Amino acid sequence: MLNNTYVLYFVNSPTALSYSLTALAAICSLTAIILTLASVRKVIDLIKKQDNDEPDDNDAWPDVSIVVYTYNNADGLSELLPTLINQDYPGVYEIVVVNDGADIATDELLTAMEKEHTGLYHTFTPRDTSNLSRKKLALMLGIKAARHDIMHLITSESRIPSDNWLKLMTRQFKNPGTKVVIGYAYPDPECDTESGRDRRLHDHLLDGVQYLSAAIDGKPYRGDGDNLSYRRSLFFDNKGFSGSLQLAYGDDDVFISDVATADNTRVEISTESQVSTVTDEPKKRFRHKKSRYNFTSKFCRSHGNTNTVITAALWIWLISSIAAVGISPLNPVIWGIVILVGSALWVPMIAIWKKAASALHSTPFGPSVPLTLMARPIRNLSYRLHKHDNPEPRFTWETI
């Protein structure tokens, strides 16, 4: 009887260790919340600010070039080009399409449209190009063909939802010191009907908030080639993509990491400046982009460790909470503290990421937000270690 009483007393009584673990869990929970709120709020607040700041059509607007990269996507191009041609832009602009691989259907489409629309031009890369980055070669040809210093780079998978897109992306260049403008592109949720859609959209959202928040904070390190702008002069002053010639990609992350600074870079993420992307194979495209960004990230400069700290804090919170309950499994005080701390973490995390998902056109996060954040580094490591069935080359010498 005495032994049973002693055991019940032990498992019901909180110890100094269990209290210490719950305190540690509370500190880590608070750290994760503060850092997450600070990071995500920067993005949401900038969107609200830019939405309320309407550009003045009476101002002088610079001449600009839109460089469109396309590869075997005549249908996508035929859907994109009318939205570019009909942009409500007070200044002069041209559209330069680079037909990577000299696709015949694409060439026929562009030749026909050029007869009807002045300011639309196209060039191409040879079909048998090898031992170099096809994407970067195509962009270099398009940039060389462009006549204006300010360039907006998109792809035939981009979809422009507003006729104010060009005006909004260009307004940041009214400051002569602006040389890079980082925009945002999101996968169209309606075009992804394959399994795992929400996981892919949420991962893209987390990536977006990470690099947008860093750029807003004066630490730009990448953009998205589906909606990215910079000056032609900056490109040539940097000797083009010379910093990543050995890489099959790197045109929108390694290059931006090389040239973007706190002083010369702006972020444009107003609602109407954001573009969607459409593809027939969303799962394949996600794996491709995820794999290449995880690979090329090692060639980009460091952009801080906020996300690492958040992830570490979440893991310590979880382990500490489990350990505290394990030490005093029948004590209601410990259980109450653990549940209270968990709720204090879960509720604001869900709320802030729900707002971010709405502002950046993703699907809403469910109650698994903290667990998603905790699992993400593991997935990223997996993509770094394996190509995930992605046969595309990483280095130019692997191309054929």
Image: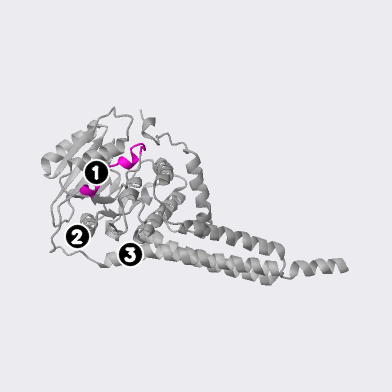
Q: Which residue is mark 1?
A: 68
Q: Which residue is mark 2?
A: 174
Mark 3 → mark 1, Cα distance in angstroms: 27 Å
CB of mark 3 within 8 Å of CB of mark 1? Answer: no
The percent coordinates of residue 32 (x first, y second) are: 51, 63
Please identify the residue farthest to the bottom as the structure is shown: 333
Please identify the residue farthest to the right as the structure is shown: 1
Relative height, residue 399 to residue 35 (above, below): above
CB of mark 2 within 8 Å of CB of mark 1? Answer: no
Relative height, residue 22 to residue 214 (above, below): below
- Looking at the image, residue 283 sits to the left or right of residue 87; the answer is right
Q: Earlier in the sequence, mark 2 or mark 1?
A: 1
Q: Which residue is mark 3?
A: 46
Q: Residue at x 51, y 55 (%)?
A: 372
Relative height, residue 248 to residue 276 (above, below): above
Q: Which element carries disc 2, helix, strand or loop?
A: helix
Q: Amino acid at mark 3?
A: Leu
The percent coordinates of residue 265 (x first, y second) are: 29, 57
Q: Amino acid at mark 2?
A: Lys
Q: Residues within 10 Å of mark 3 (few under 14, many from 20)?
A: some
Q: Which element carries disc 3, helix, strand or loop?
A: helix
Residue 251 falls within the magenta-colored stretch: no
CB of mark 2 within 8 Å of CB of mark 3? Answer: no
- For the question of whether residue 293 can be seen, the reply is no
Q: Residues within 10 Å of mark 2 (few under 14, many from 20)?
A: few
Q: Residues within 10 Å of mark 1 (few under 14, many from 20)?
A: many
Quick one: 243 or 99, which is closer to the camera? 243
Q: Residue at x 25, y 30 (%)?
A: 126
Mark 2 → mark 1, Cα distance in angstroms: 22 Å
Q: Which residues are magenta?
A: 231-248
Identify the colour scheme used: one colour
